[in-house]
Amino acid sequence: VDTGGRGVRRITERGVVVDGVEHELDCLIFATGFEVGTDYARRTGFEVVGRDGLTLTDAWRGGVRTLHGLYVHGFPNLFVESIAQSGFTVNFPYLLDVQATQVAWIINWALTHGATGVEATTEAEAGWVNAVLARSTGSVERARNCTPGYYNREGHATAATRQGSFFLGGPTEYAEILQAWRDDGGLDGLDVRGGSR
């Protein structure tokens, strides 16, 4: 059943209703398709525009650059929750919870201290990119020899692909890094505007 991108209106005992028409089904399969590794704007359906009109697509043309997979230099108050440069896990809701906890902590800090903007410094981005790349060395050979698929951009993996990979220290190490960062309380690697530290 083609929903024309509008989805199913409702599910009945016999099938699904699309555009007011019930389509009988023997089997209904949920969540069979998703995109990984494509441009952020393609997946979200909109372009994120930062300072001076820079788009996230242009900022990441040479590869994803973040601090903790969450903050991007030139994009104040933008928090990107995704798998790029963050702790890969098959339990994606766990990762979202870890990231949401981090973002909520920063927002609370900003509100408490009267800050009006936070974003990654270029130095912090470079450090995190290097940490991601250092942990992904084993994935280079695997991507080269792997059957084409979304992990290696259908057999066309590049240096930019590797840079946008997961933080291969794993989800536990990733969560521990973020917790230690919060425990330190210094907002290391973030440029904070307004308010007081």
Image: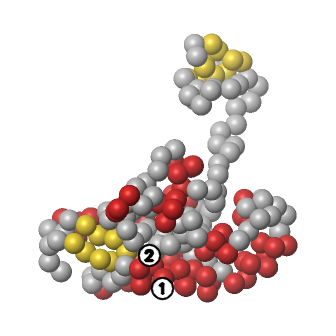
Q: Is residue 191 left or right of residue 156?
A: left
The front one of 129 and 122 is: 122
Residue, x 85% and y 73% (percent of image)? 145
Label placed on residue 179: none
Q: Which residue is mark 1?
A: 127
Percent of width and height locating residue 136? 66, 80
> Which quadrant does the N terminus fall into?
top right
- The three-letter amino acid code for the residue at tag 2 is Leu
Number of marks drawn: 2
The front one of 78 and 27 is: 78
Percent of width and height locating residue 104? 31, 63
Q: Is residue 120 left or right of residue 92?
A: left
Q: Which residue is mark 2?
A: 67
- Can residue 197 be seen here? The reply is yes
Among the two numbered marks 2 and 1 on one chain, the one whose residue lies closer to the N terminus: 2
Residue, x 18% and y 80% (percent of image)? 197
- Can residue 113 be seen here? The reply is no
How packed is label 1: few (under 14 Cα within 10 Å), some, or many (20 or more)?
Answer: some
Which structural element holds mark 1? helix
Q: Is residue 90 left or right of residue 119?
A: right
Which structural element holds mark 2? loop
Q: Is residue 13 left or right of residue 113?
A: right
